[in-house]
């Protein structure tokens, strides 16, 4: 079951907790994108974070690109208008703006959560 998250509160919690909440947020984004896209190979948020740490962030570039592809496929399957944001997510993560990725993906997740609750 998808839950709508307040993006502003999530950003503020990430700042107040010095990034600890953002790790939790990253895990929930991973689970939610997998649920929305009906991804057969479920990813574990903790493993994604550990792989990103071990590879000095290189895995996170792949992760964000993959998230864009998964959301695009979900949008196409469900008939929702949306563009492919995978390149945008990749570029933002390369330039250290992954928080913008969190915001963009959470915005898409919130749309699905509202749809699901209706």
Image (cartoon, rainbow, N blue to C red):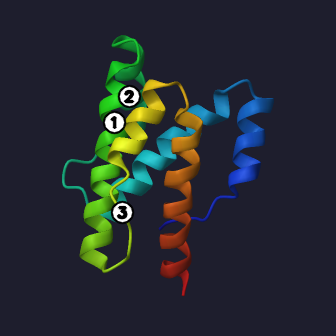
Tag nearer the camera, 1 or 3: 3
Tag nearer the camera, 2 or 3: 3
Q: CA distance from mark 1 to mark 2?
A: 5 Å
* Residue at horizontal 30 percent and vertical 78 percent from the top: 78
Q: Which residue is mark 1?
A: 63
Residue 44 showing in the rendered view:
no
Q: Quadrant of the C terminus?
A: bottom right
Mark 2 crowd level (few <14, some 14–19, many ≥20, 10 Å Cα)? many
Q: Position of residue 18 (x, y in %)?
A: 73, 23
Mark 3 crowd level (few <14, some 14–19, many ≥20, 10 Å Cα)? few
Secondary structure of the residue carrying tag 3 is loop
Q: Position of residue 80 (x, y in %)?
A: 37, 77
* Residue at horizontal 38 percent and vertical 28 percent from the top: 60
Q: Which residue is mark 3?
A: 83
Q: Position of residue 87 (x, y in %)?
A: 34, 42
Q: Which residue is mark 2?
A: 60
Q: Position of residue 32 (x, y in %)?
A: 43, 56
**Residues at circles 1 and 2 in contact by the CB criterion of under 8 Å:** yes
Q: CA distance from mark 1 to mark 3?
A: 18 Å
Residue 72 showing in the rendered view:
yes
* Residue at horizontal 42 percent and vertical 16 percent from the top: 53
Q: Nearer the viewer, residue 109 or 43?
A: 109
Q: CA distance from mark 2 to mark 3?
A: 21 Å
Q: Could you tell which of marks 2 and 3 lies nearer the N-terminus? A: 2
């Amino acid at each position: 079951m998808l839950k709508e998250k307040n993006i502003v509160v999530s950003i503020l919690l990430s700042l107040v907790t010095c990034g600890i909440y953002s790790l939790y947020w990253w895990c929930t984004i991973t689970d939610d994108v997998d649920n929305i896209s009906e991804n057969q190979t479920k990813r574990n948020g903790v493993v994604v974070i550990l792989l990103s740490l071990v590879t000095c962030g290189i895995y996170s570039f792949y992760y964000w690109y993959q998230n864009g592809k998964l959301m695009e496929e979900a949008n196409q399957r469900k008939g929702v208008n949306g563009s492919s944001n995978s390149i945008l997510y990749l570029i933002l993560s390369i330039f250290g703006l992954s928080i913008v990725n969190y915001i963009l993906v959470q915005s898409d997740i919130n749309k699905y959560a509202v749809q699901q609750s209706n």
